[in-house]
Image: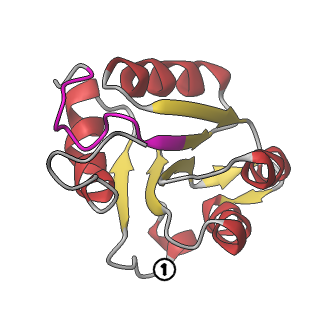
Amino acid sequence: MPSGLDGWPGDGANVLVVDDYRLCRLVVREYLQRSGCTVMTAGCRDDAAQVAANAARIDVVVTDVLLPNGNGRDVIRSVRELHPGAGVLFISGHDGYHVLGPLRSDERFLRKPFSAAQLMREIEPLLSRHAPPAGAPHR
């Protein structure tokens, strides 16, 4: 697994993690931080909207599909109002497709439980969209 390596697309990326299960938020945050990402977290749709409003940039959102006050699609709608280019990784312990519908090209789905390697494999294509050109300074 990458670990803050120069050239890996996660190095310096801003990622918002939204999950009502605190332990899941902490584990995903740890995986992403070890890979060089700056990570913000939220436990529900409303908190995610507040974090998005205060963030200068969000490159990727990792969100649970089922949340107490909405769902992952609701989270993405509110975040993309302010950060329209954010990629999305939906995560769920359930089959989330009935809630999500078809995924866009900048959206992926990962079923819980997952390893750090599986998370990185799914998130890397989303982060690659935001990677600076070779030789460019980090954001």
- The percent coordinates of residue 85 (x first, y second) are 49, 70
Residue 114, compared with residue 127, is above or below; it is: above
Residue 128 or residue 100, whichever sits in front: 128
Q: Is residue 48 above or below residue 129?
A: above
Horizontally, is 20 left or right of 25 in the view?
right
Residue for point 45% across, 69% down = 97
The stretch drawn in magenta includes residue 7: yes
- 85 and 6: which is toward the camera: 6
For residue 113, what is the image quadrant? top left
State which region is magenta: 4-15
Residue sitting at 54 percent across and 26 percent down?
24
Q: Is residue 29 magenta?
A: no
> Residue 124 location, x and y as percent?
24, 48
Q: How is the image coloured?
A: secondary structure
* Residue 21 screen position, x and y as percent: 65, 29
Relative placement, left or right, of 117 versus 65 is left
- Three-letter code, disc 1: Gly
Label 1, residues with CA under 10 Å away: few <14, some 14-19, many ≥20 = few
Q: Secondary structure at mark 1?
A: loop
Picture mark count: 1
> Which residue was labeled with disc 1?
101
Dividing the picture into quarters, in which one does residue 139 lie? top left
Quadrant of the image for the N terminus?
A: top left
Q: Residue at x 85, y 51 (%)?
A: 46
Is 133 left or right of 18, judged from the image as shown? Answer: left
What is the magenta segment's predominant secondary structure? loop
Which quadrant holds residue 108?
Answer: bottom left
